[in-house]
Image (spheres, rainbow, N blue to C red):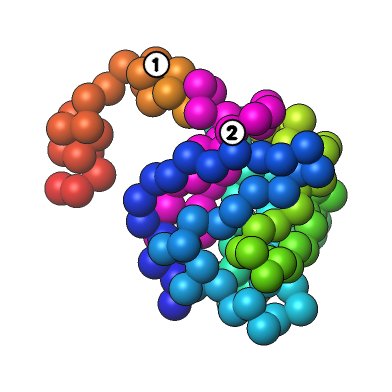
Amino acid sequence: MANFMGSYTYSVDHKGRVSIPTKFRKYIDEDADEALIITRGLDGCLFAYPIDEWQRIDERLRALPVTQQNTRVFVRMLTATAISVTLDKQGRIAIPRGLLELAGIESDVFFVGTLDHFELWNPSEYDQLMNESGQSYESIAETILM
């Protein structure tokens, strides 16, 4: 079971390659043909799932009623941008240009561990989102961790 924690900033090269933080790599099966699934996230980021965690998402999506329009639209939006990537020998992945543009990622990627997956952000977009939330850590904790 994955347990992604922490945050890290890495540079993206001109080919869209970025190193995966070393502490994240231990939760990624590098021997798998498809080491990660990268797709559109929420709030303007990308989500990255190890294969075993993605399979859990897949099962939940397949259990949703296809007769519901929101289900169909959401599955299309999520899977249309999903791609499987494999780590190279240097621990890097290549992120397609379209996904980088979707998240506004240019020269740097801000990685945020979120337990079962991690997020990839444009660092300034992440900072702006966190600063504009209008809520303190403590006030959010009061409502979530009751």
Question: In this view of the protein, which residue sits in the foreground, 136 or 73?
Answer: 136
Q: Secondary structure at mark 1?
A: helix
Q: Position of residue 21 (x, y in %)?
A: 49, 56
Residue 108 is labelled as 2
**Quadrant containing the N terminus in the rendered view:** bottom left
Tally the numbered discs: 2
Task: Tell me which numbered mark, 1 or 2, is placed earlier along the sequence.
Answer: 2
Q: Is residue 25 above or below residue 38?
A: below
Residue annotated with mark 1:
132
Q: Amino acid at mark 2?
A: Asp
Q: CA distance from mark 1 to mark 2?
A: 21 Å
Rendering quarter of residue 90: bottom right
Question: In this view of the protein, which residue sits in the foreground, 97 or 39?
Answer: 97
Residue 45 is labelled as none
Between marks 1 and 2 in the image, the one whose residue lies nearer the viewer:
2
Residue plotted at (59% across, 79% down): 29
Rendering quarter of residue 69: top right
Answer few, some or many: residues within 10 Å of disc 2's Cα (few below 14, many 20 plus, some between 14 and 19).
some
User: Was residue 96 drawn as part of the magenta stretch in this picture?
Assistant: no
Q: Position of residue 60 (x, y in %)?
A: 62, 67
Answer few, some or many: residues within 10 Å of disc 1's Cα (few below 14, many 20 plus, some between 14 and 19).
few
Per the rendered image, the range of residues in magenta is: 104-125
Q: Amino acid at mark 1?
A: Glu
Question: In this view of the protein, which residue sits in the foreground, 70 or 124?
Answer: 124
